[in-house]
Structures are given as C-alpha cells and as structure tokens.
Image (cartoon, grey):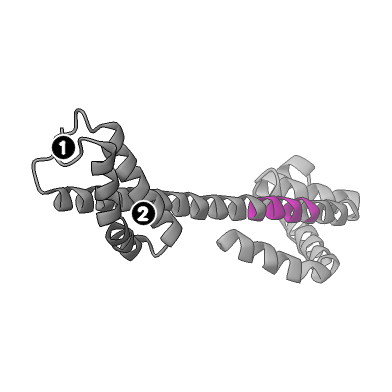
C-alpha cells in the first residue's frame, strides 16, 4: 500500500502535485498533449484502483515518472508497429496491383502474338510452333515434316520476320512489360 494515498484527499493531492509535470514529461516522448494526458490519467487511475495492494519501493516521484515513461514507450511501440504494418500493407497492395497489371499486359500480348502466329501460312506456322513451343531442333522438325533443314531455316526466318513486322507496334508494350517484370 502506498502510504501517501490513504484517502481520496491524499489521491487528489498527489494528482494536483504531479499531473502537469508528468504531462510535460510524457509530451517530451510523444509530442502529443492529448495522448500524454491520457497516459498520465491511466497511471493515476492504476494508482487509485490498486492503492490497497500497490507497493512502491522507491520515491513516489520516481515511481510516477517511470510509470509514465513506460506508458509512453508502450504507445510509441504500438505506433511503430502500426506504421510498419501500414507500410507492409502498402507494399503488398502495390505488389498485388503491379502483378495484376502485369497479368493483364501479358495476357494481351499473348493474344496479339497468337493472332500474328495464326496469320502465318500453315506450313510456316507448323515449323514455328514446333521450334518455339515444342522446343524441337531444326533437324527434328525437318525429320517430322519430311523437309530439309534448309527449308526449316528458311520458314523460321520468314516467320520471325513476319512476326517482327506484325508486332512492331507493340514494342513499347513489350519494353514496359519487361520493365515491370524487373521491378
């Protein structure tokens, strides 16, 4: 039990003696007068509600200032955690937004490439698909289609030239896509 706080009058004396000094001290930590007053009031309420069992082994001044300091540090820790979480959410939201934009751009580009490939003559399209999508070598393509490797090379050259010409307008789009993927 705190010897100085036996009655309501004792508590009022303690409150009026220390309140403004403790608020100034707390405000030095928080730079927020309302939050500082709230912490001091919480400390005072704890003293009053626990007056029967509270043991103070130091001076009341030391006890009060330490309790206010600890309350301020808890508030600052809570603010720091909240700011870190806010920053984390903003980074996550930005990442999700970027991922969605990347998916849309990739989907659009894939459609444009597919349309360009579909415009290739049938045999040239077969050669291109077997090379780029199936991963076959020119020799393997030539054997499967019963044509010479030179013919495969010629068909691939013409297919790539055609696709470059068809997709020239989308070069900025491709550069933007690669820029997003690098970030």
Q: Position of residue 89 (x, y in %)?
A: 54, 50
Residue positioned most to the left: 57
Give the prevailing secondary structure in the magenta stretch.
helix
Can residue 107 be seen at all in this image of the molecule? yes
SS class of the residue under badge 2? helix
Q: Position of residue 145 (x, y in %)?
A: 78, 43
**Chain-order first, disc 2 or disc 1:** 1
Q: Is residue 136 left or right of residue 12?
A: right
Q: Is residue 38 left or right of residue 64?
A: right
Whether residue 164 is situated above or below residue 48 in the rendered picture:
below
Q: Which residues are magenta?
A: 98-108
The residue that disc 1 covers is: 2
The residue that disc 2 covers is: 76
181 and 149: which one is in front?
A: 181
Q: Is label 2 or label 1 in front?
A: 1
* Quadrant of the rendered image containing residue 101: bottom right
SS class of the residue under badge 1? loop
């Amino acid at each position: 039990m705190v010897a100085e706080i036996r009655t309501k009058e004792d508590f009022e004396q303690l409150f009026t003696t220390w309140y403004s000094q403790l608020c100034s001290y707390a405000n030095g930590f928080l730079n927020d007068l309302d939050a500082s007053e709230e912490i001091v009031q919480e400390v005072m309420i704890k003293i009053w509600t626990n007056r029967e069992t509270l043991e103070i082994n130091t001076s009341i001044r030391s006890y009060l200032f330490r309790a206010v300091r600890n309350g301020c540090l808890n508030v600052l820790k809570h603010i720091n955690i909240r700011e870190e979480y806010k920053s984390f959410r903003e980074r996550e939201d930005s990442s999700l937004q970027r991922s969605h934009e990347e998916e849309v751009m990739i989907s659009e580009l894939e459609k444009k490439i597919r349309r360009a490939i579909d415009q290739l003559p049938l045999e040239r399209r077969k050669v291109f698909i077997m090379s780029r999508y199936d991963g076959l070598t020119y020799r393997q393509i030539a054997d499967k289609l019963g044509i010479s490797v030179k013919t495969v090379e010629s068909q691939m050259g013409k297919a790539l030239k055609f696709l470059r010409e068809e997709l020239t307008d989308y070069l900025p789009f491709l550069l933007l896509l690669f820029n997003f993927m690098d970030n």
